[in-house]
Image (cartoon, rainbow, N blue to C red):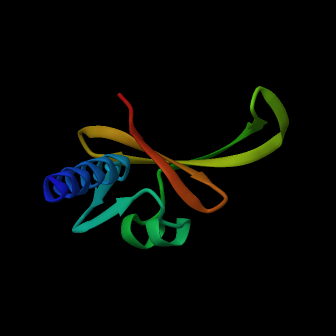
Amino acid sequence: MKRLTLTCLTILSFAFSTGAAGETLRCGSKIVKTGMTMDEVRKHCGEPTTIEIVEVDVRSGNRVTGTTNQDIWTYRRGSNKPAKLHFDIDKLMTIEYKD
């Protein structure tokens, strides 16, 4: 029974860890994923089509405690949907595909 439980926990932890890291972008033969730095993304994908800097609220619970800047890089990928990469303090946080 202990072995079965350990196996189930291992499978579940793998499933959740790959789900969280599932946001990727292919640039040629390279894969960009969340957690990478701006320099790493630039080395793999080159310069973005557009760069947008937006101010977002920093929250503690329901209270706004300040603001921070978030960089949003857009890569146009031929006939594919454009990819928007959201960076917070040089770290790639999310990748989304827009129509």
- Residue shown at 42%/66% (left/top)? 46
x then y, percent, for residue 21: 36, 53
Camera-side residue of 77 and 26: 26
x then y, percent, for residue 80: 25, 40
Camera-side residue of 86 and 62: 62
Camera-side residue of 13 and 37: 13
x then y, percent, for residue 89: 67, 59
Image height of 44 relative to 92, above or below: below
* Left/right of residue 63 with respect to residue 3 in the rendered view: right
- Residue shown at 82%/29% (left/top)? 63
Q: Which corner quadrant holds the C terminus?
A: top left
- Residue shown at 43%/73% (left/top)? 43
Image height of 29 relative to 4, above or below: below
Image height of 78 relative to 89, above or below: above
- Residue shown at 48%/61% (left/top)? 35
* Left/right of residue 72 with respect to residue 82 in the rendered view: right
User: Outermost residue, front direction?
Assistant: 1
All told, the count of numbered labels is 0
Camera-side residue of 63 and 43: 63
x then y, percent, for residue 8: 19, 50
* Left/right of residue 12 with respect to residue 97 in the rendered view: left
